Image (tube, grey):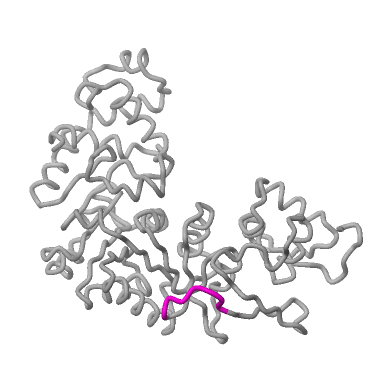
Amino acid sequence: MTEKSELTYWIGVSHLPRWTSERTNKFIIQILNEKKLNWNEFFQLDRNGWTDLYDLNEKEINDLENVKNEIPKLSFISERLINEGFDIIPINSSEYPKILKENLKIKNSPPIIYTKGYKKILSEDTVAIVGSRKAGNQALNFTNEIAKQCVENKKVIVSGFAKGVDKQALDSAISYNGKSIIVLPQGILTFQTGYKNYYESIVNGNVLVLSTFFPLAGWEVGLAMARNTYIYGLAQEIFVAESEESGGTWQGALDGLKRKRKVYVRVPEKDEKNANLKLIELGAIPVNLNLETKKLEYSIKSENKENEIHLEVNETVNDFGIKNSNFEENLVALLKLGEFTSKEISLKLKIDWNIKKLTDYLKKNPNIKVIKGKPYKFTIAEVFSPSMF
């Protein structure tokens, strides 16, 4: 076990102000792996020692000096965590979940996690069921059924503890005597009501509470958005019950697709208004209530509303039926299906351009209709120019 004094330094280093996870993780590697120092040894050095030995700028040195000055307060927090039965798990610990490192890499893996409960849950198979806070009955029924099947298959449900789909996934898993991980949008010490409500499940080893944020941090919108990354990062499989075309579920699904993760999306009913079909168009795997993922047929109205385009969707949904790799032909085929942002076009067509370059190209193309808004959306113009081919 890591010494208490080392854990105190870990808390300070892991929450340095305006340090990205990548910068913090590279700093940790430099000190612990390359220089073979522990935190006690590092913080015994003075400002000049840090400047001589490490590539640190003025702000970073000031931040580290602040950690040194805050050690008495941080020590009190680490003592409280240990005394109240919380676990402090640094990124170099054998108890740190491998799935987080595999999915988030050095760039986004949290340098430290805090847990309450049976921490061996972190090494079990995991599934995230995510969706809108205002999800409809179809999405909630889907969530309940997926949770039930996950429990039957000994898989742990990862929940963000938000209203709607997240809460349904957690409660369903508990009702079926399954296991869950609650990923908090706040510090581990500020979830007191939650500990009371889920005390029995935590004590029985069925619920693990996890946070990546400073232990005393209260709930914030920014933390809630950041938390979504860790929900997806902790999961081996991702199921989207219902998504809007913005917000945490949407961004998390897009990020998962970008990372080549398997993202399963519920095929919506014809009268539903959500962005599930759009995610399927972008490469998500369509799935129904029985977890059937192949050859699910759905239809999308074309722009002129006179024709309906039918797609037979397999797991990859790669090319909209286009057999060649011609960029402009694939672009036309995509834009005939509806309205898309530059980011969505880039993701679907796997274009190796930055978003600004692609947006400029689309805005200047006479064959493409620009729909103003934040962000811009694009669809096919009513008249095609022969020069496009």
Quadrant of the frame with the C terminus? bottom right
359 left or right, relative to 387: left
Task: Kindly indicate the quadrant of the structure image that contains residue 318.
Answer: bottom right
Quadrant of the frame with the N terminus? top left
The answer to whether residue 97 is seen in the rendering is yes
257 left or right, relative to 195: right
Using the image, determine if residue 113 lies above or below residue 25: below
Task: Choose between 196 and 141: the one closer to the eye.
Answer: 141
Judge whether residue 374 is colored magenta. no
- Quick one: which residue is furthest to the left in this view? 83
- The percent coordinates of residue 331 (x first, y second) are 74, 60
Using the image, determine if residue 97 lies above or below residue 15: below
Using the image, determine if residue 77 lies above or below residue 175: above
- The percent coordinates of residue 2 (x first, y second) are 16, 36
- The percent coordinates of residue 242 (x first, y second) are 47, 74
Q: Which residues are magenta?
A: 290-296
Residue depicted at 17% across the width and 48% down the height: 87
Residue depicted at 55% across the width and 72% down the height: 275
- Quick one: which residue is furthest to the right in this view? 386
Task: Kindly indicate the quadrant of the structure image that contains residue 40.
Answer: top left
- The percent coordinates of residue 240 (x first, y second) are 45, 69
Residue depicted at 30% across the width and 38% down the height: 14
312 left or right, relative to 126: right
Task: Kindly indicate the quadrant of the structure image that contains residue 208.
Answer: bottom left
Task: Choose between 326 and 78: the one closer to the eye.
Answer: 326
Magenta: predominant secondary structure element? loop
Question: How many numbered discs, if any?
Answer: 0
The answer to whether residue 223 is seen in the rendering is no
